[in-house]
Each structure stands twice: as C-alpha cells, then as structure tokens.
Amino acid sequence: MFESVLDQACRDARDWPGTPAIAVNVTPHQLADKAFSGKLFSLLSRHGFPAARLEIEITEDALIVDVAATRRCIRKLKERGVRVVLDDFGTGYSSLRQLRELPFDRVKIDRSFIAGVGSDRQSEEIVVSTINLCRALGLQTVAEGIEDQVQADWICAHGADAAQGFFYARPAPAAEVLEKLKGFNPRS
C-alpha cells in the first residue's frame, strides 16, 4: 500500500511549480524493515523525485516496535535528505530522550490537544509546553487539526511554526492542488 501511495504522489507532485514537499505516513513495521529505505530511494529515483521534497511521518508507536531498527532507518533517510516528522505527538509512547536523540525535523502536535485551545486551560498548557520543548530541542512544530479562526489565532500567538487543518484546506485531488499552485504567488 505504501509503495503505491508514494508512487502516485511522486507522479502527481514531481512537476508541480516550485518545490512543495509531499508527506507520507509510514508504519512502525515499515521502519523496522531493513529493505524499506532501499525500496523508498529506488522509487524516488525511478520518478526523478528529490528526496529533499519528501517528508516521512511516523507516529510515536514506531519508537517502541524496534527502536534500534527504527533509528537506523531514520538515519538512512536523513542522510539522503528525506525529512522525518513525528506525527500525532502526545498520544503515544515517545520519551524525551528519543525526542532529543532521534533526528526529527518537526513534531506535529496532535489534534486532540489543539481542539481545546481557546477553551481548555489544560490543553493550552500542553500545547505551549510542547512548543517550548520542541523549540529548546531545535525542532519545528506543526499544530494539527485547526478548524476555526480562534484556534488559528491562538496557535499563531503562541509560536507554533506551522498549522494545518480544515480551516486552511480540505483534502483535494492532485489536479486541483496543481491548479492552486499555479495561481499561488508567495510574494503577495
């Protein structure tokens, strides 16, 4: 399944204007597979898709299946330019040690915490603490699940590096994304 998803994503995004990244979720078992990185780089090469435009998103569960194999795989990916993102942070089993030692590029704060910003003090404290922790570790943060202006304003005011959610855009077919990218002017 992963290979067909990545294959299609590379075909769709290869010639998009600019250099937007694509993000693909990876399972813990894929990261533990010794052949995974080789298959991934072969697929990227076949499509002429630069590794630097790929983000692999892993959940905290990947850090407990086979930590040594996951660590080796992440390092191989990073050595070739793939960005590695810890997804759904706060809902799994990662330790601060793993967060510090593994070469993540970004941490995505789970939507369950974002849902409470602007209305739930505990959720706000967790989000602020996570942003500050990641900043101290040199990691960017992404707030997942932004659904309204209140959440968007709160996240911006509290220093997350990026945000995503239905408030900004809904999932769309590749052709629709291409049309939007053609009309996008980052300087305006």
Image: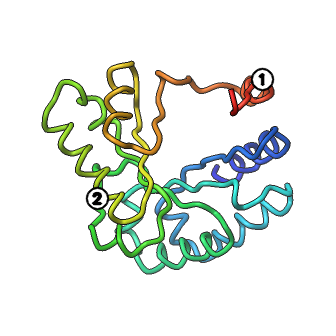
**Between 32 and 186, the one nearer to me in the picture:** 186
Q: Residue at x 35, y 67 (%)?
A: 99
Residue at the extreme front of the image, as rendered: 187
Q: Secondary structure at mark 2?
A: helix
71 above or below 125?
A: below
**Between 140 and 86, the one nearer to me in the picture:** 140
Q: Secondary structure at mark 1?
A: loop
Name the colouring of the figure: rainbow
Image coordinates of residue 74 in percent, x first then y, are 54, 71
The residue that mark 1 highlights is 183
Q: Is residue 184 left or right of residue 69?
A: right
| Marking on residue 139 | none
Q: Residue at x 34, y 36 (%)?
A: 111
The residue that mark 2 highlights is 133
Total labels drawn? 2
Tell me which label, 1 or 2, sits earlier in the chain: 2
The amino acid type, in three-letter code, at marker 1 is Gly
